[in-house]
Amino acid sequence: QSALTQPRSVSGSPGQSVAISCTGTSNDVGGYNYVSWYQQHPGKVPKLMIYDVSQRPSGVPDRFSGSKSGNTASLTISGLQADDEADYYCCSHAGYNSHWVFGGGTKLTVL
Amino acid sequence: EVQLVESGGGLVQPGGSLRLSCGVSGFTFSSYEMNWVRQAPGKGLEWVSYISSSGSNIDYEDSVKGRFTVSRDNAKNSLYLQMNSLRAEDTAVYFCARERQTSGFDSWGQGTLVTVSS
């Protein structure tokens, strides 16, 4: 199972919006509405930000939103804040032989 | 409070074995599917293994199939990963992660470092 494709880096200024894409295939992203997104600060444990493509766990600000079109999922962060600077990973269900597959990760820099 | 605590990591020679444990508290362990996820130094997250709530369904990432075995003891609130025939490329921090009913790993342990080196 190949990793999902994410841009290696994105950047934005405080207050702006950025979008991070996550491209897979019809066997994973396109085939299931089971995409999740994780934020990971350096040296820290990953934190669930979005599940089931567009749902936010309690406590996650509504500045974070998720969507999907075809084989590509996206995480959009609006009103960028300094603390949003982190690595972001997407993850998708990939069927019952591979179960889950992660993206390679995207480093978000807040300028 | 939900807690997951991994243990068992360390330095092992290529070809060696290690058994990781993940003790949990603060939730009904037997109701949740669980996973192992690893992260090599400076690299991204990689899913390793899945086990259903009862332990009857199990999945592995291709590179660990035949070498790693996941198991759980619901009476002891514990998850395990037996790792055999370890390779240098298995060097990583190993996290246990609780899986939501549909998608998403909503709770993670702090991780345990496995280093495979001679």
Image (tube, coloured by chain):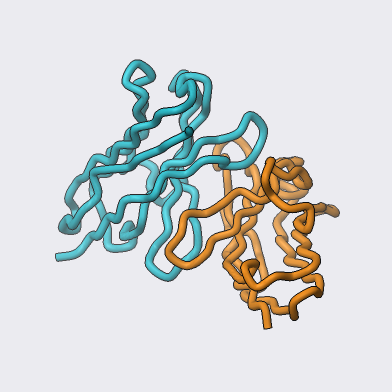
Chain colours: A orange, B cyan
Q: Residue furthest bottom?
A: A111
How many numbered marks does the figure carry?
0
Going by the image, does B108 lie left or right of B5? right
Which of the two residues, B70 or B11, is positioned nearer the viewer here? B11
Going by the image, does B107 lie left or right of A106? left
Going by the image, does B10 lie left or right of A53? left
Residue A17 drawn at (x, y percent): 81, 70
A26 up-or-down from A78: above or below: above
Q: Is residue A72 visible?
A: no
Determine the image quadrant of residue B81: top left
Determine the image quadrant of residue B75: top left
Image point (64%, 77%), residue name? A109
Image point (43%, 22%), residue name? B55
Which image quarter is the C terminus of chain B in? Answer: bottom left
A84 up-or-down from A38: above or below: below
Q: Residue furthest top?
A: B75
Which of the two residues, A27 or B13, is positioned nearer the viewer here? B13
Image point (63%, 44%), residue name? A94
Image point (78%, 62%), residue name? A76
B42 up-or-down from A34: above or below: below
Q: Is residue A7 visible?
A: yes
Residue A7 drawn at (x, y percent): 67, 72
Residue A10 drawn at (x, y percent): 69, 76
Which of the two residues, A47 or B49, is positioned nearer the viewer here? A47
Determine the image quadrant of residue B39: bottom left
Which of the two residues, A76 or B85, is positioned nearer the viewer here? A76
